[in-house]
Structures are given as C-alpha cells and as structure tokens.
Image (cartoon, rainbow, N blue to C red):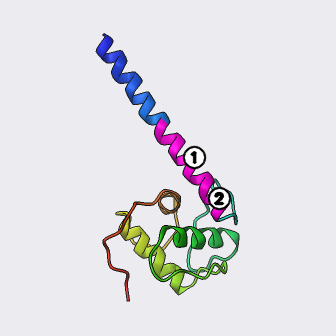
Amino acid sequence: MIRRKCSVLGAALLTAGALATTTHEAAAAEKTCPYTSSIDRPALTDVSTGPSVKQAQCLSNVWGGVPKLAVDGVFGTATSKKVIWIQGCHGLGRTGVVDQATWRVLYDPALDCYDPYPK
C-alpha cells in the first residue's frame, strides 16, 4: 500500500516537473520570439504569412540549424525546408506543415540533431 502511494506521488511529481519545464521554456521563447503567444499555434503551410510565421521562423533560429531564416513572416521555400529538417530531427513526419506536433518541438526542441541539413 505504501509502495503504491509512493509511486503515485512520484509520478505526480514528475508530471508537475515536466509541465513546469515546458511552461518555463515557452515563456523564455516568448521573450526571445515575441511575435505571438506560445498558445497561438495555427497550422502553417507554404501559403501562410503573418506573425505566426514570424514566430515559427524565430523559434527555428533559436533552436539552431543552418541557415538562419529571415524572420519576415512569409512561409517560403527556405522556411519549408527548415521545417522539414526540424521535423525529421524530432522523428515527425516530414510534411513541411507546422502542425501542433511541430509547434511543440519548436518550443521544446531536442538538444541536437544528427540529420544533415538538406542542400
């Protein structure tokens, strides 16, 4: 009985820690990339423009990879190529669409990527 209570408490603490870390990282990203709120995560495609595209471009630059994108709010070829690369680095489908899963990795990226950047 005590062991069960301890494991439930441990799981709850781990979950709370993960949520606090995600919230902290999202808040830090909002200061670095202030174009939209971290809860504003519309689907973005190659025809998208505006502040949400700027946010995605900025977040991709904060994470890394070469080249750095121009934060111009236009989802062009360079943005699409970098989104596809980021998706591959995180084990997501390489769709080029910034969907909810892609937004999650933009705000909470893996520490490193071993996929070479496409030429």
* Nearest to the observer: residue 99 or residue 35: 35
- Where residue 39 sits: x, y (%)? 64, 53
Residue at x 64% of width, y 81% of height: 74
Q: Is residue 37 above or below residue 98?
A: above
Q: Is residue 58 magenta?
A: no
Residue 60's x, y, as percent? 52, 70
Residue drawn at the location 50% of the way across and 71% of the way down = 97
Judged from this view, the residue extending furthest toward the bottom is 119
Compared with 57, 111 (above or below) is: above
* Span colored in magenta: 17-32
State the residue position of label 2. 30
Badge 2 amino acid: Glu
State how far apart marks 2 and 1 are (Cα).
Answer: 11 Å
Image quadrant containing the N terminus: top left
- Residue 21 in the image, given as x and y percentages of width and height: 51, 45
* Res. 42 image quadrant: bottom right
Dot label at residue 23: 1
On the image, the x and y values in percent for residue 26 come to 58, 53
Depth check: 110 or 78 in front?
A: 110
The three-letter amino acid code for the residue at tag 1 is Thr
The number of numbered badges drawn on the structure is: 2
Q: Is residue 22 magenta?
A: yes
- From the viewer's perspective, tell me whether residue 59 is left or right of residue 4: right
- The residue furthest top is 1
Measured along the vertical axis of the image, is residue 13 above or below residue 51?
Answer: above
Give the mark nearer the N terminus: 2 vs 1. 1
Asked which quadrant contains residue 13, the reply is top left
